[in-house]
């Protein structure tokens, strides 16, 4: 029997253990924080006969394969130990791919991955095409393989973390939506982060289909690193192109912004990528367009929440980097902007072109003094300390037609468990305001 070690006991790691069990591996888990493993996880490990090991025990066993969970960096001492031994060290995505019977649509980029993944899955669903939306989307790839067991399409959202340790992973269709600085707390250089994303096409060839954003300056600057068969989607590309008036096919307008339920030019780009990939997967062009018209924006990504006394509220809690926030700030006028959390890096001058769209900013969390120091004098702003104060202050100062926008540009871990909790709290505060108004 082969031995499988998974490093990191998060959702992806546990799904790899489960798949390993069904593929007749003897399964082991190493986690840096064994004392923090939840009781439900312990029950899972017991049910599948998974042995929890410390580092000393790990070194005494010969493992055929080592799967590294996406949250575990390659600098981890156990990961480094096996890399130094030239062992078979792979990601959960790579492990799942070894047992894939269907085809992968792979989607990566610094921003818009989740929305585009959801859009592509939405188009494919209901077309008599077996489809699973998985990966970084919240449904691990290995778990989808276990539960779906079909030979259809797996639409996989892929973070740089998930792509770091792929070897043979080869999507049938893939996209890079954009590149912008992020995760510099994990990577030594920006290029290291970008090159992790480029692993999405490392095994692709001219029999596969790869799309890239023809208006993204960073992607264009790496043109010589992209496949020769790359198909570009931009303002003047063929057959598919995008501008503020909508999406075009062979220069004929096929979708206008007022026909969809989402906001912003960036989301038109996301829709164009989704249409292009679904079309390549076998859905007719007109059907792709009709399905996009029925797509509802996903939670926490420029999500419309409510209107109270003419004031609009939008939840963009998933915008944890500067590039995401730039897209949000370009989507509205008369913005009362709520931002802050744990600062991950970024150039504040990126926000200057949107200063006329911002009436006032309300900064929260650990980074509030940083934001105030950088933006004071450029826009009107204050430190509101926490989300509740920010929502109250923004609403009390707003007039009809204003937009209260939560778009933090930061991670949430100073005051919340994750961006989802931050977004849900924002929505609950808006609901309370409505009940009190």
Image (cartoon, grey):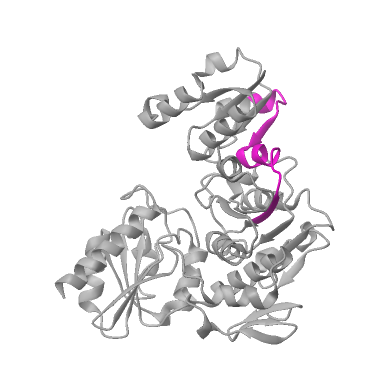
Taking the image as shown, residue 34 lies to the left or right of residue 434, namely right
Quadrant assignment for the C terminus: bottom left
The quarter holding residue 105 reads bottom right
| Depth check, front residue: 376 or 430 | 430
Taking the image as shown, residue 297 lies to the left or right of residue 28, namely left
Instruction: Point out the stretch of residues depicted in magenta.
Output: 82-106
Q: What x and y, as percent, mark residue 203?
A: 78, 48
Q: Which residue is drawn at 57% across and 73% down?
A: 291
Q: Can residue 38 be seen in this view?
A: no
| Depth check, front residue: 9 or 165 | 9
Q: Which residue is drawn at 42% across and 82% down?
A: 356
Quadrant assignment for the N terminus: top right
Q: What x and y, as percent, mark residue 53?
A: 51, 19
Above or below, comparing residue 169 to residue 201 in the picture: above
Q: Which residue is drawn at 65% across and 40% down?
A: 96
Q: Can residue 251 be seen in this view?
A: yes
Q: What x and y, as percent, mark residue 373?
A: 36, 64
Taking the image as shown, residue 182 lies to the left or right of residue 284, namely left
Q: Does the magenta stretch include residue 412?
A: no
What is the residue that sits farthest to the front in this orientation? Answer: 128
Could you tell me how many numbered marks the image carries? 0
Q: What x and y, as percent, mark residue 81?
A: 62, 24
Q: Does the magenta stretch include residue 97?
A: yes
What is the residue that sits farthest to the top in this orientation? Answer: 60
Taking the image as shown, residue 1 lies to the left or right of residue 388, namely right
């Amino acid at each position: 029997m082969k031995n499988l070690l998974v490093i990191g006991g998060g959702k992806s790691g546990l799904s790899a253990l489960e798949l390993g069990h069904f593929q007749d591996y003897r399964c082991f888990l190493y986690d840096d924080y064994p004392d923090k493993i939840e009781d439900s996880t312990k029950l899972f490990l017991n049910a599948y006969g998974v042995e929890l090991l410390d580092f000393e025990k790990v070194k005494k066993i010969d493992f055929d394969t080592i799967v590294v969970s996406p949250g575990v960096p390659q600098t981890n001492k156990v990961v480094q130990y096996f890399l130094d031994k030239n062992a078979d060290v792979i990601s959960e995505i790579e492990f799942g791919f070894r047992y894939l019977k269907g085809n992968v649509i792979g989607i990566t980029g610094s921003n818009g991955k989740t929305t585009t993944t959801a859009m592509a899955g939405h188009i494919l669903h209901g077309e008599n095409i077996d489809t699973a939306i998985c990966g970084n989307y919240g449904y691990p790839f290995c778990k989808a393989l276990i539960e779906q067991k079909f030979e259809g399409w797996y639409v996989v959202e892929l973070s740089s973390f998930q792509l770091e340790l792929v070897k043979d992973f080869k999507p049938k269709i893939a996209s890079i939506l954009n590149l912008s600085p992020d995760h510099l707390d994990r990577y030594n250089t920006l290029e290291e982060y970008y090159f992790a994303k480029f692993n999405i096409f490392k095994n692709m060839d001219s029999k596969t289909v790869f799309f890239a954003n023809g208006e993204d300056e960073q992607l264009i600057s790496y043109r010589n690193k992209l496949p020769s068969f790359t198909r570009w989607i931009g303002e003047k590309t063929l057959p598919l192109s995008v501008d503020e008036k909508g999406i075009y096919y062979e220069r004929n307008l096929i979708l206008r912004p007022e026909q969809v339920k989402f906001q912003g030019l960036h989301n038109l780009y996301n829709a164009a990528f989704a249409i292009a990939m679904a079309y390549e997967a076998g859905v007719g062009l007109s059907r792709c367009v009709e399905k996009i018209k029925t797509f509802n924006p996903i939670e926490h990504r420029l999500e419309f929440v409510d209107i109270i006394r003419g004031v609009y509220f939008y939840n963009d809690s998933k915008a944890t980097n500067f590039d995401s926030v730039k897209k949000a700030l370009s989507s509205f006028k008369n913005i009362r902007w709520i931002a802050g959390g744990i600062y991950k890096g970024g150039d504040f001058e990126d926000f200057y072109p949107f200063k006329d769209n911002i009436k006032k900013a309300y900064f929260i969390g650990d980074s509030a003094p940083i934001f105030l120091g950088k933006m004071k004098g450029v826009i009107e702003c204050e430190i509101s300390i926490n989300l509740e104060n920010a929502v109250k202050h923004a609403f009390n100062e707003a007039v009809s037609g204003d937009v209260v926008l939560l778009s933090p540009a930061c991670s949430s871990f100073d005051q919340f468990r994750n961006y989802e909790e931050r977004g849900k709290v924002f929505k609950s505060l808006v609901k309370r305001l409505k009940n009190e108004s």
